Image (cartoon, grey):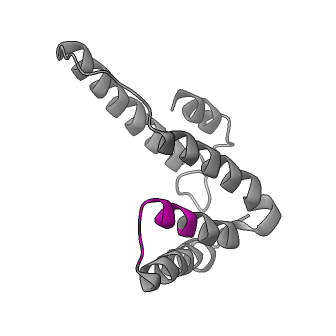
Amino acid sequence: MLLIFILALQIPSKPIDGGPGPGYIPLIYSSIGMLLSLGIFINSIREKTTEKFYLSNHFFLFILIITGYAILIPILNYYIATIIFIIIILLIMGARKLSLILLLPLIYSVFIFMIFEKVMGIPMP
């Protein structure tokens, strides 16, 4: 979160049409993430537990998939990479309903397209 916050500070703060600049949303999200992380950290210090913490194999698989997703965005374009990413995640999470697996990524991509490209005029990579 701190890295995202620092990188967001480096985004030019020139506002578009008098509104917030392009770094506004990453700053807000990273600030909220850091506050929530701090709260979880403080809560973990206060609670004494004997449970052992371990990372499941799914954690490493998700890291690998997210890395692949980030690599595929500039190659395939955002929308195709996102559809593939969501389908893979749904399958790993156990979704078996074909309509959900096919419609959810498509609806999400159309929603993002409408909001960013049509309403705000911001092209996706």
Q: Relative to 25, does residue 37 appear above or below in the rendering? A: above
Query: Which residue lies at the image location 52% right of the left edge and 75% below the top edge?
Result: 105
Q: Nearest the camera: 95 or 103?
A: 95
- Count of marks, rendered view: 0
Kindly give the residue lying farthest to the right in the view shown: 75
Q: Relative to 123, does residue 19 appear above or below in the rendering? A: above
Q: Is residue 89 magenta?
A: yes
Q: Position of residue 29 (x, y in %)?
A: 45, 44
**Secondary structure, magenta segment, majority class:** helix
Q: Nearest the camera: 12 or 108?
A: 108
Query: Which residue lies at the image location 82% right of the left edge and 62% below the top edge?
Result: 75
Q: Which residues are magenta?
A: 87-96
Q: Nearest the camera: 73 or 51?
A: 51
Query: Which residue lies at the image location 62% right of the left edge and 51% below the top edge?
Result: 65
Q: Is residue 113 left or right of residue 58?
A: right
Locate the C terminus by quadrant. bottom right
Q: Is residue 79 left or right of residue 44?
A: right
Q: Is residue 101 magenta?
A: no
Kindly give the residue lying farthest to the bottom in the view shown: 99
Query: Which residue lies at the image location 31% right of the left edge and 21% below the top edge?
Result: 52
Q: Position of residue 57 (x, y in %)?
A: 50, 40
Q: Position of residue 90 (x, y in %)?
A: 47, 66
Residue 12 visible (yes or no): yes
Residue 123 visible (yes or no): no
Q: Is residue 118 left or right of residue 91?
A: right
